[in-house]
Amino acid sequence: MGSLLRNMAVGALLVAAQLPAFAQTDTLDVSNGEVIASGSWDDGNFSITYNVMAMGNEVMYTYTLNVPDTPAVSHWILELCPELVLDDGGSFDNDEFQVTMGTHGSLAVGSFGPGSGNPGFPDGASITGVKFDETTGVGDVVFKVITHTLPEEGSFYAKGGSANFAYNSGLDSGDDFILVPGCDIIPEPTSFVLAALGIASAGMILRRRR
C-alpha cells in the first residue's frame, strides 16, 4: 500500500510539472462543401482556418477568415460556452475571454439565429456565443482569443456586405465543425500538486497508524 501511494503521489507531481502542450490546425473550405457560402464568397473564395494551442492552463484560439477584398466581413459569430464570457453579474468577463488580436467595434453575447441581420442563416439553427460586430479591414480577418477552457466542436457564421454569408456545414445538416472554447476548465497546476501532497500525506498517516 505504501509503495502504491508513493507512486500515485510521484505520478501526480509529474503531471503537475509537465502539463501537456498540444496544437491543432485545420481549414474548412467552400470548395469541398465544408463551408456554405453565397455571392462572391461562394466562388471558392472563402475559407476559415483555426489553430488551437495550449500550454499550462491557457489555450489560444486563432481564427483566420480568408475572404476576398470585397465584400469585407462586417460581423461574425463564434459559438462558445456562455458561462465562459459572462461573469456572475451577467457582464462580459475579459479575464476569462481575452481578445488579443482582431479589430471590431463591439462584442455581443447571446443566442443568434436567422433574421435580416444574418442573411442565409439556416432556419431552425442558432449559435450561442459571441458576435464580433463592425469588424474592419479589407481581406483576411484574424482573431486571437485566450481562455482557460478546453476546446470542443462548434460553429461559426460570417456576413459580408448586404447579402454575402458563410457558415460551417455542421450548423445546418452537415458534419463539419471548427474547434471553439468549451466549458471544461483546465485544472490549475496547483490542484495537481495539492492532490499529490494529499495522497502523500494520507500515506504517511496510514504508515504511522500501523
Image: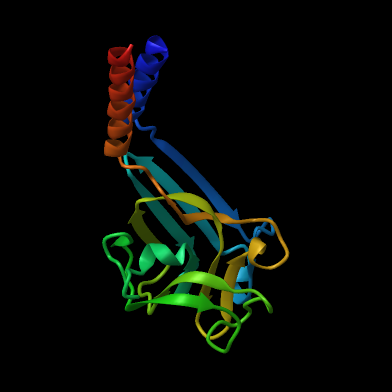
In the rendered image, the residue lying farthest to the bottom is 116
Residue sitting at 64 percent across and 74 percent down?
125
Residue sitting at 37 percent across and 61 percent down?
143
- Quarter in which the C terminus is drawn: top left
Specify whether residue 189 is in view.
Answer: yes
Q: Quadrant of residue 127?
A: bottom right
Is 99 displayed left or right of 62 in the figure?
left
Residue sitting at 53 percent across and 86 percent down?
117
Relative depth, front residue between 184 and 114: 184
Relative depth, front residue between 129 and 210: 210
In the displayed structure, 97 sits above or below 39; it is: above
Q: Where is residue 36? Give x, y as percent.
A: 65, 67
In the rendered image, the residue lying farthest to the right is 173
- Quarter in which the N terminus is drawn: top left
Q: Where is residue 60? Give x, y as percent.
A: 36, 50
Relative depth, front residue between 2 and 162: 2
In the displayed structure, 190 sits above or below 121; it is: above
In the rendered image, the residue lying farthest to the front is 209
Residue sitting at 39 percent across and 43 percent down?
53
